[in-house]
Image: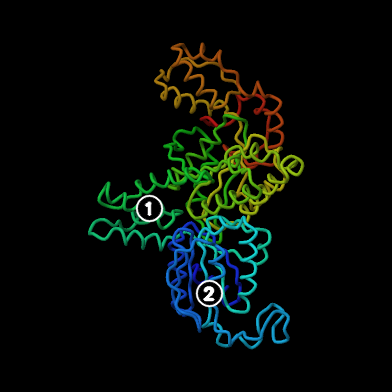
Amino acid sequence: MSLSQHLAEYVAAAFTGIWVRSHEHADALIEIARLCRERNWSLATWDVDKGLATEGRPAAGTAPHSDTDTTDPLAAIRALAALAPHEGLTAGLSEGSPESSSDGSSEGSSEGTAEHTALLVLPNFHRFLSGAEVVQALAHQVQRGKQDRTFVVILSPVVQIPIELEKQFVVLEHELPDRTQVEQIARGVATEEGEMPHGEDLIRLVDAAAGLTRFEAEGAFALSLVRHGRLIPQTVWELKEGMLRKSGLVTLHRGKESFADLGGLDALKQFCLKALSGGSRAARPRGVLLLSPPGCGKSQFCKALGNETARPTLVLDVGALYGSLVGQTEERVRQALRLADAMAPAVLFIDECDKALSGVASSGQSDGGVSARLFGTLLTWLSDHDSDVFVAMTANDVSKLPPEFSRAERFDAIFFLDTPGTAEKEKIWPIHLARYGLDVESRRPESREWTGAEIQSCCRLAALLDVPLKEAAKNVVPVAVTAAESVHRLRAWATGRCLDATLGGVYTRGAESSSPAGRRLSRQSSN
Protein backbone atom coordinates (compact mmCIF):
# COMPACT_ATOMS: atom_id res chain seq x y z
CA MET A 1 0.00 0.00 0.00
CA SER A 2 1.35 3.43 -0.95
CA LEU A 3 1.95 6.34 1.40
CA SER A 4 -1.04 8.25 0.00
CA GLN A 5 -3.34 5.27 0.57
CA HIS A 6 -2.18 4.88 4.17
CA LEU A 7 -2.50 8.61 4.74
CA ALA A 8 -6.04 8.72 3.33
CA GLU A 9 -7.10 5.97 5.74
CA TYR A 10 -5.62 7.67 8.78
CA VAL A 11 -7.11 11.03 7.85
CA ALA A 12 -10.51 9.37 7.41
CA ALA A 13 -10.09 7.87 10.88
CA ALA A 14 -9.23 11.33 12.28
CA PHE A 15 -5.67 10.63 13.43
CA THR A 16 -4.65 14.27 13.61
CA GLY A 17 -0.99 13.65 14.45
CA ILE A 18 0.85 11.61 11.79
CA TRP A 19 4.59 10.94 11.73
CA VAL A 20 5.93 9.70 8.38
CA ARG A 21 9.36 8.10 8.40
CA SER A 22 10.89 8.98 5.02
CA HIS A 23 14.30 9.57 3.46
CA GLU A 24 12.67 11.00 0.33
CA HIS A 25 10.76 14.08 1.38
CA ALA A 26 10.34 15.45 -2.13
CA ASP A 27 8.62 12.27 -3.31
CA ALA A 28 6.54 12.06 -0.14
CA LEU A 29 5.38 15.65 -0.64
CA ILE A 30 4.43 14.90 -4.24
CA GLU A 31 2.26 11.97 -3.09
CA ILE A 32 0.64 14.02 -0.34
CA ALA A 33 -0.03 16.97 -2.67
CA ARG A 34 -1.60 14.66 -5.25
CA LEU A 35 -3.85 13.16 -2.56
CA CYS A 36 -4.92 16.61 -1.38
CA ARG A 37 -5.81 17.71 -4.90
CA GLU A 38 -7.83 14.53 -5.49
CA ARG A 39 -9.74 14.96 -2.22
CA ASN A 40 -10.03 18.77 -2.45
CA TRP A 41 -8.12 19.17 0.83
CA SER A 42 -6.16 22.25 1.83
CA LEU A 43 -2.40 21.73 2.13
CA ALA A 44 0.28 23.77 3.84
CA THR A 45 3.99 23.00 4.07
CA TRP A 46 6.67 24.55 6.22
CA ASP A 47 10.42 24.20 6.49
CA VAL A 48 13.03 26.43 8.07
CA ASP A 49 14.51 27.43 4.69
CA LYS A 50 11.42 28.29 2.63
CA GLY A 51 8.98 29.13 5.39
CA LEU A 52 5.24 28.51 5.10
CA ALA A 53 3.48 27.86 1.79
CA THR A 54 -0.08 26.78 1.11
CA GLU A 55 -1.98 25.35 -1.83
CA GLY A 56 -5.51 24.17 -2.35
CA ARG A 57 -8.77 25.76 -1.27
CA PRO A 58 -8.37 28.16 1.70
CA ALA A 59 -10.73 27.96 4.62
CA ALA A 60 -14.04 29.82 4.37
CA GLY A 61 -13.80 33.42 5.50
CA THR A 62 -10.03 33.66 5.09
CA ALA A 63 -7.88 35.13 2.37
CA PRO A 64 -5.71 32.80 0.34
CA HIS A 65 -2.38 32.36 2.07
CA SER A 66 0.59 33.16 -0.14
CA ASP A 67 4.16 32.07 0.29
CA THR A 68 5.80 33.62 3.32
CA ASP A 69 9.37 33.83 4.56
CA THR A 70 8.52 33.07 8.18
CA THR A 71 10.99 30.69 9.82
CA ASP A 72 9.25 30.45 13.18
CA PRO A 73 8.02 26.88 13.85
CA LEU A 74 5.46 28.17 16.36
CA ALA A 75 3.96 30.49 13.71
CA ALA A 76 3.74 27.57 11.28
CA ILE A 77 1.79 25.45 13.76
CA ARG A 78 -0.58 28.29 14.61
CA ALA A 79 -1.13 29.07 10.92
CA LEU A 80 -2.90 25.74 10.54
CA ALA A 81 -5.91 27.23 12.31
CA ALA A 82 -6.39 29.56 9.33
CA LEU A 83 -6.96 26.52 7.12
CA ALA A 84 -9.66 25.12 9.39
CA PRO A 85 -13.27 24.89 8.08
CA HIS A 86 -15.61 27.84 8.50
CA GLU A 87 -16.77 28.45 12.03
CA GLY A 88 -20.35 27.49 11.27
CA LEU A 89 -19.41 23.85 11.56
CA THR A 90 -17.89 24.13 15.03
CA ALA A 91 -19.37 27.31 16.48
CA GLY A 92 -20.44 26.93 20.06
CA LEU A 93 -18.76 23.53 20.38
CA SER A 94 -15.92 23.28 22.83
CA GLU A 95 -14.34 20.56 24.86
CA GLY A 96 -16.73 19.31 27.48
CA SER A 97 -19.85 20.87 25.93
CA PRO A 98 -22.95 18.70 25.64
CA GLU A 99 -22.82 18.84 21.86
CA SER A 100 -19.27 17.56 21.83
CA SER A 101 -18.32 13.88 21.88
CA SER A 102 -15.95 12.47 24.46
CA ASP A 103 -12.96 12.50 22.08
CA GLY A 104 -13.38 16.18 21.32
CA SER A 105 -15.07 15.76 17.94
CA SER A 106 -18.53 17.21 17.46
CA GLU A 107 -21.47 14.90 16.98
CA GLY A 108 -23.34 15.36 13.75
CA SER A 109 -20.54 17.38 12.19
CA SER A 110 -19.04 14.53 10.19
CA GLU A 111 -21.36 15.26 7.28
CA GLY A 112 -19.54 17.62 4.99
CA THR A 113 -16.38 17.85 7.10
CA ALA A 114 -14.39 15.55 4.83
CA GLU A 115 -14.37 18.32 2.19
CA HIS A 116 -13.02 20.79 4.76
CA THR A 117 -9.88 18.84 5.63
CA ALA A 118 -6.55 20.66 5.96
CA LEU A 119 -3.02 19.21 6.27
CA LEU A 120 0.14 20.88 7.54
CA VAL A 121 3.28 19.01 6.45
CA LEU A 122 6.48 19.68 8.39
CA PRO A 123 9.64 18.18 6.83
CA ASN A 124 12.50 17.47 9.28
CA PHE A 125 10.47 18.97 12.13
CA HIS A 126 12.06 16.57 14.63
CA ARG A 127 14.87 19.13 14.84
CA PHE A 128 12.49 21.60 16.51
CA LEU A 129 10.93 19.30 19.09
CA SER A 130 13.44 19.95 21.84
CA GLY A 131 11.76 23.16 23.01
CA ALA A 132 8.83 23.11 25.44
CA GLU A 133 6.93 25.84 23.57
CA VAL A 134 6.95 23.99 20.26
CA VAL A 135 5.98 20.67 21.87
CA GLN A 136 3.10 22.28 23.76
CA ALA A 137 1.82 24.16 20.71
CA LEU A 138 1.94 20.98 18.67
CA ALA A 139 0.07 19.05 21.36
CA HIS A 140 -2.67 21.71 21.43
CA GLN A 141 -2.97 21.73 17.64
CA VAL A 142 -3.20 17.93 17.39
CA GLN A 143 -5.97 17.93 20.00
CA ARG A 144 -7.79 20.84 18.33
CA GLY A 145 -7.57 19.05 14.99
CA LYS A 146 -10.23 16.60 16.18
CA GLN A 147 -12.74 19.47 16.09
CA ASP A 148 -11.70 21.42 13.02
CA ARG A 149 -10.36 18.59 10.79
CA THR A 150 -6.78 19.85 10.68
CA PHE A 151 -3.91 17.35 10.53
CA VAL A 152 -0.23 17.69 11.35
CA VAL A 153 2.08 15.50 9.23
CA ILE A 154 5.76 15.37 10.21
CA LEU A 155 8.25 14.05 7.65
CA SER A 156 11.45 12.75 9.20
CA PRO A 157 14.12 10.12 8.43
CA VAL A 158 13.97 9.00 12.08
CA VAL A 159 11.21 8.55 14.63
CA GLN A 160 12.07 10.80 17.58
CA ILE A 161 8.73 11.66 19.16
CA PRO A 162 8.92 13.50 22.51
CA ILE A 163 7.31 11.57 25.32
CA GLU A 164 4.64 14.28 25.66
CA LEU A 165 3.46 13.55 22.10
CA GLU A 166 3.93 9.79 21.88
CA LYS A 167 0.25 8.97 22.42
CA GLN A 168 -0.93 11.64 19.98
CA PHE A 169 1.04 10.54 16.91
CA VAL A 170 0.84 7.45 14.72
CA VAL A 171 3.83 6.39 12.62
CA LEU A 172 3.67 5.58 8.90
CA GLU A 173 6.46 4.29 6.66
CA HIS A 174 7.29 5.81 3.30
CA GLU A 175 8.59 2.61 1.76
CA LEU A 176 11.53 2.38 -0.59
CA PRO A 177 10.49 1.86 -4.22
CA ASP A 178 9.50 -1.68 -5.15
CA ARG A 179 10.77 -3.41 -8.27
CA THR A 180 7.98 -2.09 -10.46
CA GLN A 181 8.79 1.47 -9.43
CA VAL A 182 12.52 0.88 -9.94
CA GLU A 183 11.83 -0.30 -13.48
CA GLN A 184 9.71 2.78 -14.13
CA ILE A 185 12.57 4.99 -12.91
CA ALA A 186 14.97 3.16 -15.22
CA ARG A 187 12.67 3.63 -18.20
CA GLY A 188 12.37 7.31 -17.37
CA VAL A 189 16.18 7.66 -17.52
CA ALA A 190 16.91 5.33 -20.46
CA THR A 191 14.76 6.86 -23.19
CA GLU A 192 16.91 6.15 -26.25
CA GLU A 193 17.09 2.95 -28.29
CA GLY A 194 19.52 0.40 -26.87
CA GLU A 195 19.87 2.03 -23.46
CA MET A 196 17.35 -0.17 -21.65
CA PRO A 197 18.12 -3.88 -21.04
CA HIS A 198 15.57 -6.64 -21.55
CA GLY A 199 14.79 -10.08 -20.18
CA GLU A 200 17.28 -11.49 -17.68
CA ASP A 201 19.48 -8.40 -17.98
CA LEU A 202 16.57 -6.22 -16.88
CA ILE A 203 15.88 -8.51 -13.90
CA ARG A 204 19.53 -8.25 -12.81
CA LEU A 205 19.45 -4.47 -13.19
CA VAL A 206 16.32 -4.15 -11.04
CA ASP A 207 17.79 -6.52 -8.45
CA ALA A 208 20.91 -4.38 -8.31
CA ALA A 209 18.87 -1.24 -7.63
CA ALA A 210 16.63 -2.83 -4.97
CA GLY A 211 17.02 -1.06 -1.64
CA LEU A 212 17.97 2.30 -3.15
CA THR A 213 15.85 5.39 -2.73
CA ARG A 214 14.24 6.90 -5.81
CA PHE A 215 16.87 9.64 -5.88
CA GLU A 216 19.73 7.13 -5.54
CA ALA A 217 18.32 4.82 -8.21
CA GLU A 218 17.92 7.66 -10.68
CA GLY A 219 21.50 8.78 -10.02
CA ALA A 220 22.88 5.27 -10.44
CA PHE A 221 21.08 4.80 -13.76
CA ALA A 222 22.27 8.18 -15.00
CA LEU A 223 25.88 7.33 -14.09
CA SER A 224 25.58 4.04 -16.00
CA LEU A 225 24.41 5.92 -19.09
CA VAL A 226 27.30 8.39 -18.84
CA ARG A 227 29.88 5.62 -18.49
CA HIS A 228 28.55 2.93 -20.79
CA GLY A 229 25.77 4.46 -22.85
CA ARG A 230 23.32 1.91 -21.44
CA LEU A 231 22.05 0.61 -18.13
CA ILE A 232 24.16 -2.20 -16.64
CA PRO A 233 24.06 -3.69 -13.12
CA GLN A 234 27.81 -3.31 -12.45
CA THR A 235 27.63 0.48 -12.19
CA VAL A 236 24.58 0.30 -9.94
CA TRP A 237 26.35 -2.18 -7.63
CA GLU A 238 29.40 0.06 -7.43
CA LEU A 239 27.35 3.06 -6.38
CA LYS A 240 25.20 0.96 -4.10
CA GLU A 241 28.24 -0.37 -2.24
CA GLY A 242 29.30 3.17 -1.36
CA MET A 243 25.80 4.13 -0.27
CA LEU A 244 25.51 1.11 2.01
CA ARG A 245 28.92 1.82 3.53
CA LYS A 246 27.81 5.39 4.17
CA SER A 247 24.81 4.17 6.15
CA GLY A 248 27.10 2.35 8.58
CA LEU A 249 24.48 -0.37 9.06
CA VAL A 250 25.34 -3.04 6.50
CA THR A 251 28.08 -3.42 3.91
CA LEU A 252 28.06 -5.13 0.56
CA HIS A 253 30.62 -7.90 0.12
CA ARG A 254 32.08 -7.89 -3.39
CA GLY A 255 34.62 -10.73 -3.15
CA LYS A 256 35.18 -13.46 -5.74
CA GLU A 257 34.94 -16.48 -3.42
CA SER A 258 33.30 -19.61 -4.76
CA PHE A 259 32.66 -23.16 -3.66
CA ALA A 260 35.61 -24.22 -5.80
CA ASP A 261 37.84 -22.57 -3.17
CA LEU A 262 36.32 -24.76 -0.45
CA GLY A 263 37.25 -28.39 -0.06
CA GLY A 264 34.48 -30.54 1.38
CA LEU A 265 31.36 -29.31 3.18
CA ASP A 266 29.42 -31.30 0.61
CA ALA A 267 26.22 -31.69 2.66
CA LEU A 268 26.16 -28.01 3.59
CA LYS A 269 26.74 -26.90 -0.01
CA GLN A 270 24.01 -29.13 -1.37
CA PHE A 271 21.54 -28.08 1.31
CA CYS A 272 21.97 -24.35 0.71
CA LEU A 273 22.01 -24.59 -3.08
CA LYS A 274 18.84 -26.65 -3.10
CA ALA A 275 17.10 -24.36 -0.60
CA LEU A 276 17.94 -21.26 -2.64
CA SER A 277 17.25 -22.70 -6.09
CA GLY A 278 13.58 -23.50 -5.68
CA GLY A 279 10.71 -23.29 -3.27
CA SER A 280 7.62 -21.13 -3.28
CA ARG A 281 6.73 -18.00 -1.38
CA ALA A 282 4.90 -20.18 1.16
CA ALA A 283 8.07 -22.25 1.70
CA ARG A 284 10.74 -19.57 1.51
CA PRO A 285 14.16 -20.49 2.98
CA ARG A 286 15.25 -18.75 6.19
CA GLY A 287 18.94 -19.51 6.59
CA VAL A 288 21.58 -21.56 8.36
CA LEU A 289 23.57 -21.26 11.58
CA LEU A 290 27.14 -22.56 11.23
CA LEU A 291 29.00 -23.70 14.32
CA SER A 292 32.66 -24.75 14.46
CA PRO A 293 36.06 -24.11 16.02
CA PRO A 294 37.85 -21.08 14.53
CA GLY A 295 39.38 -21.60 11.09
CA CYS A 296 37.12 -24.31 9.70
CA GLY A 297 35.66 -22.29 6.82
CA LYS A 298 32.40 -20.84 8.15
CA SER A 299 32.98 -17.26 7.02
CA GLN A 300 34.49 -18.32 3.71
CA PHE A 301 31.44 -20.44 2.98
CA CYS A 302 29.03 -17.57 3.76
CA LYS A 303 30.92 -15.20 1.47
CA ALA A 304 30.98 -17.76 -1.34
CA LEU A 305 27.28 -18.58 -1.01
CA GLY A 306 26.14 -15.28 -2.51
CA ASN A 307 28.35 -15.69 -5.58
CA GLU A 308 27.22 -19.28 -6.08
CA THR A 309 23.53 -18.30 -5.98
CA ALA A 310 23.86 -14.93 -7.83
CA ARG A 311 22.68 -13.01 -4.78
CA PRO A 312 24.26 -9.95 -3.17
CA THR A 313 25.95 -10.72 0.15
CA LEU A 314 25.16 -8.17 2.82
CA VAL A 315 27.41 -8.14 5.88
CA LEU A 316 25.77 -7.11 9.16
CA ASP A 317 28.13 -6.27 12.02
CA VAL A 318 25.87 -6.53 15.06
CA GLY A 319 28.45 -4.85 17.31
CA ALA A 320 28.47 -1.75 15.10
CA LEU A 321 24.72 -1.26 15.60
CA TYR A 322 25.09 -0.18 19.22
CA GLY A 323 24.43 3.53 19.67
CA SER A 324 25.19 5.95 22.48
CA LEU A 325 21.71 7.49 22.71
CA VAL A 326 18.63 5.99 24.33
CA GLY A 327 16.70 3.97 21.75
CA GLN A 328 19.35 4.48 19.06
CA THR A 329 20.53 0.86 19.06
CA GLU A 330 17.04 -0.57 18.57
CA GLU A 331 16.31 1.91 15.80
CA ARG A 332 19.57 1.09 14.01
CA VAL A 333 18.78 -2.64 14.17
CA ARG A 334 15.31 -2.13 12.72
CA GLN A 335 16.69 0.13 10.00
CA ALA A 336 19.39 -2.41 9.04
CA LEU A 337 16.84 -5.23 8.83
CA ARG A 338 14.48 -3.06 6.76
CA LEU A 339 17.36 -2.38 4.39
CA ALA A 340 18.08 -6.11 4.10
CA ASP A 341 14.41 -6.79 3.36
CA ALA A 342 14.40 -4.10 0.67
CA MET A 343 17.42 -5.67 -1.05
CA ALA A 344 15.91 -9.15 -1.27
CA PRO A 345 16.76 -11.59 -2.76
CA ALA A 346 20.01 -11.46 -0.80
CA VAL A 347 22.28 -13.37 1.59
CA LEU A 348 22.64 -11.67 4.98
CA PHE A 349 25.96 -12.68 6.57
CA ILE A 350 26.24 -12.22 10.36
CA ASP A 351 29.67 -13.33 11.56
CA GLU A 352 30.54 -14.50 15.09
CA CYS A 353 27.12 -13.76 16.51
CA ASP A 354 28.10 -15.42 19.80
CA LYS A 355 30.53 -12.60 20.54
CA ALA A 356 28.16 -9.82 19.45
CA LEU A 357 25.27 -11.20 21.54
CA SER A 358 27.18 -12.75 24.44
CA GLY A 359 26.04 -10.04 26.88
CA VAL A 360 22.33 -10.77 26.51
CA ALA A 361 22.03 -12.75 29.76
CA SER A 362 23.48 -9.92 31.87
CA SER A 363 22.08 -7.10 29.77
CA GLY A 364 19.86 -5.69 32.51
CA GLN A 365 22.81 -5.14 34.85
CA SER A 366 25.48 -4.18 32.33
CA ASP A 367 23.84 -1.98 29.70
CA GLY A 368 20.30 -1.21 30.84
CA GLY A 369 18.78 -3.95 28.70
CA VAL A 370 20.04 -2.66 25.34
CA SER A 371 21.57 -6.02 24.33
CA ALA A 372 18.41 -7.87 25.34
CA ARG A 373 16.23 -5.57 23.24
CA LEU A 374 18.60 -5.85 20.26
CA PHE A 375 18.53 -9.63 20.62
CA GLY A 376 14.73 -9.64 20.85
CA THR A 377 14.38 -7.53 17.71
CA LEU A 378 16.72 -9.85 15.80
CA LEU A 379 14.91 -12.98 17.04
CA THR A 380 11.54 -11.61 16.00
CA TRP A 381 12.80 -10.77 12.54
CA LEU A 382 14.41 -14.18 12.10
CA SER A 383 11.08 -15.84 12.84
CA ASP A 384 8.69 -13.47 11.11
CA HIS A 385 10.36 -11.91 8.07
CA ASP A 386 8.81 -13.01 4.79
CA SER A 387 11.31 -11.37 2.46
CA ASP A 388 13.65 -13.52 0.36
CA VAL A 389 16.66 -12.90 2.62
CA PHE A 390 18.75 -15.99 3.42
CA VAL A 391 20.58 -15.57 6.73
CA ALA A 392 24.03 -17.14 7.01
CA MET A 393 25.17 -16.82 10.62
CA THR A 394 28.33 -18.14 12.25
CA ALA A 395 29.34 -18.87 15.84
CA ASN A 396 32.31 -20.39 17.63
CA ASP A 397 30.63 -20.94 20.99
CA VAL A 398 26.88 -21.43 20.91
CA SER A 399 26.83 -21.92 24.70
CA LYS A 400 27.06 -18.13 25.02
CA LEU A 401 23.73 -17.73 23.25
CA PRO A 402 20.31 -18.18 24.89
CA PRO A 403 18.62 -21.48 23.98
CA GLU A 404 15.72 -19.77 22.19
CA PHE A 405 18.18 -18.53 19.57
CA SER A 406 18.49 -21.93 17.91
CA ARG A 407 14.90 -23.11 18.05
CA ALA A 408 13.14 -24.41 14.94
CA GLU A 409 11.85 -21.93 12.32
CA ARG A 410 14.53 -19.35 13.06
CA PHE A 411 16.94 -21.25 10.83
CA ASP A 412 16.41 -24.03 8.32
CA ALA A 413 19.28 -25.96 9.87
CA ILE A 414 22.23 -25.75 12.27
CA PHE A 415 25.41 -27.28 10.86
CA PHE A 416 28.61 -28.24 12.68
CA LEU A 417 31.90 -27.89 10.78
CA ASP A 418 34.54 -30.04 12.44
CA THR A 419 38.28 -29.95 11.77
CA PRO A 420 39.08 -31.66 8.45
CA GLY A 421 40.07 -35.30 8.25
CA THR A 422 42.59 -36.98 5.98
CA ALA A 423 40.45 -37.02 2.84
CA GLU A 424 39.52 -33.39 3.41
CA LYS A 425 43.12 -32.33 3.73
CA GLU A 426 43.89 -34.01 0.41
CA LYS A 427 41.64 -31.39 -1.19
CA ILE A 428 42.77 -28.46 0.95
CA TRP A 429 46.56 -28.69 0.52
CA PRO A 430 46.59 -28.38 -3.33
CA ILE A 431 44.37 -25.29 -3.20
CA HIS A 432 46.81 -23.35 -1.00
CA LEU A 433 49.97 -24.73 -2.53
CA ALA A 434 48.82 -23.45 -5.92
CA ARG A 435 47.68 -20.13 -4.41
CA TYR A 436 51.16 -19.35 -3.04
CA GLY A 437 53.10 -20.75 -6.01
CA LEU A 438 54.47 -23.81 -4.21
CA ASP A 439 55.10 -27.23 -5.68
CA VAL A 440 51.94 -29.30 -5.21
CA GLU A 441 54.18 -32.37 -4.84
CA SER A 442 56.04 -30.85 -1.88
CA ARG A 443 56.42 -33.05 1.17
CA ARG A 444 53.78 -32.00 3.65
CA PRO A 445 54.11 -31.86 7.41
CA GLU A 446 52.03 -33.87 9.85
CA SER A 447 48.81 -31.84 10.07
CA ARG A 448 47.04 -33.65 12.87
CA GLU A 449 43.98 -31.65 14.01
CA TRP A 450 44.82 -28.75 11.69
CA THR A 451 42.05 -26.55 10.35
CA GLY A 452 41.91 -25.17 6.81
CA ALA A 453 43.17 -21.82 8.10
CA GLU A 454 46.25 -23.48 9.61
CA ILE A 455 47.05 -25.29 6.35
CA GLN A 456 46.79 -21.95 4.57
CA SER A 457 49.06 -20.34 7.15
CA CYS A 458 51.69 -23.03 6.68
CA CYS A 459 51.70 -22.51 2.89
CA ARG A 460 51.86 -18.74 3.22
CA LEU A 461 54.77 -18.90 5.68
CA ALA A 462 56.64 -21.34 3.44
CA ALA A 463 56.33 -18.87 0.56
CA LEU A 464 57.10 -15.87 2.75
CA LEU A 465 60.19 -17.33 4.44
CA ASP A 466 61.25 -19.42 1.43
CA VAL A 467 61.49 -22.58 3.48
CA PRO A 468 60.08 -26.11 3.05
CA LEU A 469 56.59 -26.83 4.33
CA LYS A 470 57.90 -28.92 7.22
CA GLU A 471 60.07 -26.03 8.35
CA ALA A 472 57.18 -23.57 8.08
CA ALA A 473 54.97 -25.96 10.07
CA LYS A 474 57.13 -25.35 13.16
CA ASN A 475 55.49 -21.90 13.36
CA VAL A 476 51.94 -23.27 13.35
CA VAL A 477 50.21 -24.34 16.56
CA PRO A 478 46.70 -25.67 15.82
CA VAL A 479 43.68 -24.29 17.64
CA ALA A 480 42.81 -27.85 18.65
CA VAL A 481 45.90 -27.64 20.87
CA THR A 482 45.76 -24.03 22.05
CA ALA A 483 42.03 -24.28 22.84
CA ALA A 484 41.68 -28.02 23.32
CA GLU A 485 39.14 -27.75 26.11
CA SER A 486 36.89 -25.39 24.14
CA VAL A 487 37.01 -27.59 21.04
CA HIS A 488 36.18 -30.65 23.14
CA ARG A 489 33.17 -28.91 24.71
CA LEU A 490 32.00 -27.67 21.31
CA ARG A 491 32.10 -31.15 19.78
CA ALA A 492 30.27 -32.57 22.78
CA TRP A 493 27.54 -29.93 22.47
CA ALA A 494 27.16 -30.43 18.71
CA THR A 495 26.77 -34.20 19.01
CA GLY A 496 23.10 -34.99 18.46
CA ARG A 497 22.17 -31.30 18.15
CA CYS A 498 23.65 -30.24 14.79
CA LEU A 499 23.84 -31.55 11.25
CA ASP A 500 27.15 -32.76 9.86
CA ALA A 501 28.35 -30.24 7.25
CA THR A 502 30.25 -32.90 5.34
CA LEU A 503 28.30 -36.14 5.59
CA GLY A 504 24.84 -34.77 6.28
CA GLY A 505 22.51 -36.17 8.88
CA VAL A 506 22.93 -35.57 12.60
CA TYR A 507 26.51 -34.96 13.69
CA THR A 508 27.94 -37.69 15.90
CA ARG A 509 31.31 -37.43 17.52
CA GLY A 510 32.86 -40.84 17.00
CA ALA A 511 36.26 -42.22 17.78
CA GLU A 512 37.62 -40.68 14.60
CA SER A 513 36.86 -37.18 15.96
CA SER A 514 39.62 -37.46 18.54
CA SER A 515 41.91 -39.08 15.98
CA PRO A 516 41.40 -36.94 12.88
CA ALA A 517 43.53 -39.17 10.70
CA GLY A 518 40.44 -41.30 10.31
CA ARG A 519 37.95 -38.45 10.09
CA ARG A 520 35.75 -37.56 7.18
CA LEU A 521 35.87 -36.00 3.71
CA SER A 522 37.46 -32.59 3.05
CA ARG A 523 37.31 -28.93 3.82
CA GLN A 524 39.37 -25.77 3.47
CA SER A 525 39.76 -22.07 4.06
CA SER A 526 39.98 -19.58 6.85
CA ASN A 527 37.22 -18.43 9.12
Disc marking residue 8: 2
User: Residue 514 at x, y = what percent?
Assistant: 67, 25
Q: Is residue 248 visible?
A: yes
User: Residue 474 at x, y = what percent?
Assistant: 56, 13
Mark sitting earlier along the chain (2/1): 2
**Viewport quadrant of the C terminus:** top right
The residue identified by callout 1 is: 204
Image position of 100 with respect to 274: above or below = below
Residue visible at 54% across and 27% down in the picture? 452
Q: Is residue 173 visible?
A: no
Q: Secondary structure at mark 2?
A: helix
Q: Nearer the viewer, residue 256 or 137?
A: 137
User: Residue 341 at x, y = what percent?
Assistant: 52, 54
Locate residue 483 relative to residue 287 in the image: left or right.
Answer: right
Q: Residues within 10 Å of mark 2 (few under 14, many from 20)?
A: some
Nearer the observer, disc 2 or disc 1?
A: 2
Residue visible at 65% across and 59% down in the picture? 132
Residue visible at 45% across and 33% down in the picture? 261
The answer to whether the residues at label 2 and label 1 have Cβ atoms under 8 Å apart is: no
Locate residue 198 relative to residue 86 in the image: left or right.
Answer: left
**How far is the residue under mark 2 from the one under mark 1?**
35 Å
Q: State the count of labels.
A: 2
Q: Residues within 10 Å of mark 1 (few under 14, many from 20)?
A: some
Q: Amino acid at mark 2?
A: Ala
Q: Secondary structure at mark 1?
A: helix
Disc marking residue 150: none
Q: Amino acid at mark 1?
A: Arg
Q: Nearer the viewer, residue 245 or 403?
A: 245
